[in-house]
Image: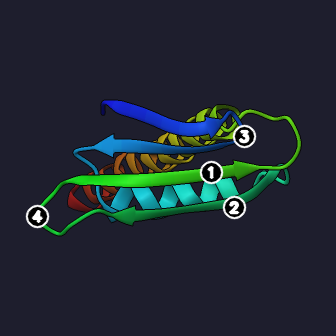
């Protein structure tokens, strides 16, 4: 996921995420907005035929926008890993239960 950043100052930045769509945009926006230092966070798809999003973050005070962006990505990865671990554990339990029933 190549990222470009454009902004006049560090606390208001638009990140351009290539090869991404609403799947990442909306979930990342949710994670970033949980940060109390973020004043605004939103994204838009530039055009339906392009697979990139403009992701804008504006923070309060002197906090650089890249910090909540990075934290949001890390938090989202943590949530995805938790979902994956829970799914894999449930599948193991399900398969073990099916094997017991067949015996």
Q: Residues within 10 Å of mark 3 (few under 14, many from 20)?
A: some
Label 1, label 2: how far apart the Cα atoms are: 6 Å
Packing grade of label 1 (10 A; few <14, some 14-19, many >=20) is many
Residue carrying label 3: 11
Residue 40, label in figure: 2
Q: Which mark is residue 13?
A: none
**Above/below status of 78 relative to 57:** above
The residues bearing labels 4 and 3 have C-alpha atoms spaced at a distance of 30 Å
Q: Residue furthest right?
A: 61
Which circle's residue, 1 or 4, is located before the other in the chain? 4
Residue drawn at x 48%, y 46% as measured from the top left? 80
Q: Are marks 4 and 2 in contact (CB under 8 Å)?
A: no
- For the N terminus, give its image quadrant: top left
Q: Tell whether 52 sits left or right of 79.
A: left
Tell me which numbered mark, 4 or 2, is placed earlier along the sequence. 2
First reached walking from the N terminus: tag 2 or tag 3: 3
């Amino acid at each position: 996921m190549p990222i470009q950043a454009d902004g006049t100052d560090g606390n208001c930045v638009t990140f351009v995420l290539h090869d991404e769509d609403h799947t990442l945009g909306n979930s990342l926006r949710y994670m970033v907005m949980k940060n109390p230092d973020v004043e605004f966070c939103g994204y838009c798809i530039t055009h339906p035929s392009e697979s990139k999003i403009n992701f804008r973050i504006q923070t309060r005070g002197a906090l650089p926008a890249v910090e909540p962006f990075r934290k949001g990505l890390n938090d989202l990865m943590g949530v995805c890993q938790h979902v994956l671990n829970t799914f894999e554990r449930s599948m193991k339990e399900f398969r073990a239960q099916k094997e017991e029933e067949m015996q």
